[in-house]
Every structure is written in structure tokens, then in C-alpha cells.
Image (cartoon, helix red, strand yellow):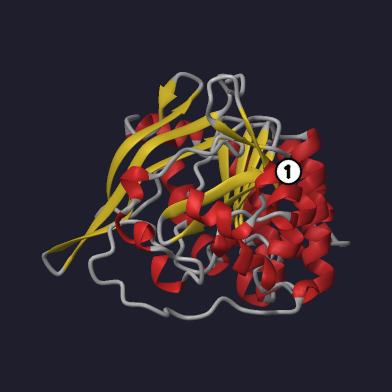
Amino acid sequence: MENRRKSDIEIRNLSVSFQDGGETVHAMEGVNAYFPAGSVTGLIGESGSGKSLLGMSILGLLSGQAKVEGTCMYKGMDLYRLPEKEMQEIRGKEISLIPQNPTESLNPIRRIGKQLTECMTVHGNKDKELANSRRDEFLRRFGFADPDRISRAYSFQLSGGMNQRVISAMGLMNRPKWAIADEPTKGLDAILRRQVYQVLKEISETDTEGMIVITHDIALAGVLCDRLMVLYKGSIMEVGDTRTILEHPAHPYTKGLVASLSAKGMNPIGRAVRKNEGNSGCSFYPRCPYAADACKTGRSRRRSFRMDGSEVCPVCLRSAISARHLRAESSGRPVWMR
């Protein structure tokens, strides 16, 4: 068991549901996630896997139609239960967001510079000189050689990639304790993607206590992140240190994600090979090449395997990895060997 710190973020038994045409849609059920301070955790998975849903829940930024149950503990506070006024104090100052859609985050009729400095003044910092200095510093860090020109510009005068870097600077210039970066390299070419990831890595080491990176770019996540959390259809498939996940994936879904990388031959995960009817077990069951009958209804009968605190189905482990990766803990429970 890892030593918990007050500045860690720990989600317990998270369930998120929405109403759709009179029916209740369960996007997440009973999810437990732990984000230790001092690390960069990457949330990876296909589109629609629940990566952004999990990240946005921490900041209370899900739509008003979302019903959120569970707890999210940070510094002794349950973020899911805080009044909106208190959450506004936490957003941007304690925990900041780098959103994935700059067109929804930037005001097209206000200059970029004004919007950046406002990120500091809205949290009580009235020192204009400091705000301007911090603005220029972070614009330079994100690859803008002429911060003055960018500050005078409007968002519609910049490319999508430039606006993405602007909101990255906006999310970090207030030096939050935690940063949640939602697809921070979206719309960037390969060179700029690596540059942004390098900046985020530097910031995670010098400016923040922790960082959560939501991304579909598994290769670059391998460069930036210490830990990876793999999601599929609102469930966490496995969690572990980055090297273990990428070199020795335990869950077949993770194995498929890794196999889809260009360095691994670009073999995408196949479509459903069996019907999903009556499936109350593993959400990956219809697409899993190793699925057994127990996978269809066996959620409640899963045994726990420790992998940075995660649970991994024993059927998946037997199919995807060798027994040498497991040993017995003093309690008798199997433990993932890094």
C-alpha cells in the first residue's frame, strides 16, 4: 500500500450517469482511481473510453445533466461535495485545466494577452507587472518567440495549433498545484507535440505537485508520464508504471493499444467478435480474443491483482503474461512484479 499524502487525489466508487430520452445512461460505475502527488499519470484509451469524463469530474466540470456519485478526496476535501463557490477557488489555483478545445476556451473578441493575464488577476493577484511577466514567460516556454505579437492577436488570427499552445500556457501560468491536461497536443505536428510534452515534463518537475495527462498519443505519453491508467468504456482496465504497461501489458485491451503503435507494427484492435447481449462482466468481452465464459458475467468473481493498486482479471493475466510476473504477498494475495 502506497503512503497517502493530503495532496494526492483519490477517487472512490465514482459513478456517472446521464439522462437520454427518458433513459439513464451509465457512463461510469464504481470506478476507483488514485493519483499520487509527485507523479505524472497518463489516462490512455480509445475515444469514448471515459478519459475526459474522469478528468473533468475532478474539477466538477461535467454537464449539469450528469449525476455524479462517489468521493474525490484532495487535501481533506471531497471535491464532489464542495459548493460551486469553493470549487471556483480551487480551479486554476489549486487544480488547473488545459482543455482540449481552444475555440470553446478563448474569447474571439478579446486579445490573447488580456485573457492570459486575467487568469492570474481572477485569483486575486493584482500585480500587473508580474502577470505580464508570467504571461511572456509561459508563451516563450510553449514555443512563441515573440510573446508581444501573440498577446496583441485575437484567437481567430492564430492557427488551431497555436491556440492549443496558448491555452496550455493559460492553464499553467498561475502555477497550480495540479494540472489536468486534456489532449494538450491536439492539432500539433510531430515537432511541436514533442516540444509541448517536453515543456509539460519540465513543469511537472519544477512547478506542480502532480499532473494528469489525458491523451490518445501513447508513444508520447511514454515519454512524459510516470504512470499510465488504461480506460475502456468507463472502466479502468489496468494501472501501472509506464514501462511495465508499455513493455508488459497485462490486459488484452492494453496489449491491443500497444500493438497499434507504429513501433509495434500498427496492428489495431479488432471489432467485436461476439455479441454483447447479457454481458455484465468485463466491458471488453465482445472484442477480447482471450475471453472465457467467466468474463461475460464474472465481474463480481474477479480476484485482485496489485499493479500500482489496480485490479486485473486473472483470465487476462493468464492469457497475456507469464506467471513469472506474479509472486505471493505475505497476505497471500498475488502482486504484480515490476
User: Is 59 or 245 nearer to us in this picture?
Assistant: 245
Q: Position of residue 215 (x, y in %)?
A: 62, 60
Q: Position of residue 29 (x, y in %)?
A: 32, 48
Taking 96 as reference, is 108 above or below it? below
Q: Residue furthest right?
A: 145
In terms of image quadrants, where is residue 240? Answer: top right
Q: Position of residue 37 (x, y in %)?
A: 65, 30
User: Is 180 or 267 nearer to us in this picture?
Assistant: 267
In terms of image quadrants, where is residue 8? Answer: top right
Q: Residue at x 55, y 49 (%)?
A: 238
Would residue 99 be found to the left or right of residue 50 on screen? right
Give the residue at mark 1.
226
The residue carrying pointer 1 sits among few (fewer than 14), some (14 to 19) or many (20 or more) residues within 10 Å by Cα, namely some
Quadrant location of the C terminus in the rendered image: top right
Q: Count of labels shown?
A: 1
Taking 330 as reference, is 215 above or below it? below
Would residue 86 be found to the left or right of residue 251 on screen? left
Identify the secondary structure beneath mark 1: loop
Q: Quick check: can you spot residue 299?
A: yes
Q: Residue at x 68, y 31 (%)?
A: 209
Q: Position of residue 207 (x, y in %)?
A: 75, 34
In terms of image quadrants, where is residue 301? Answer: top left
User: Is 284 or 99 nearer to us in this picture?
Assistant: 284
Q: Residue at x 65, y 54 (%)?
A: 321
Would residue 112 be found to the left or right of residue 56 on screen? right
Q: Quick check: can you spot residue 139?
A: no
Quadrant location of the N terminus in the rendered image: top right
Q: Residue at x 75, y 40 (%)?
A: 204
Q: Tell me which amino acid carries mark 1.
A: Asp
Taking 121 as reference, is 223 above or below it? below
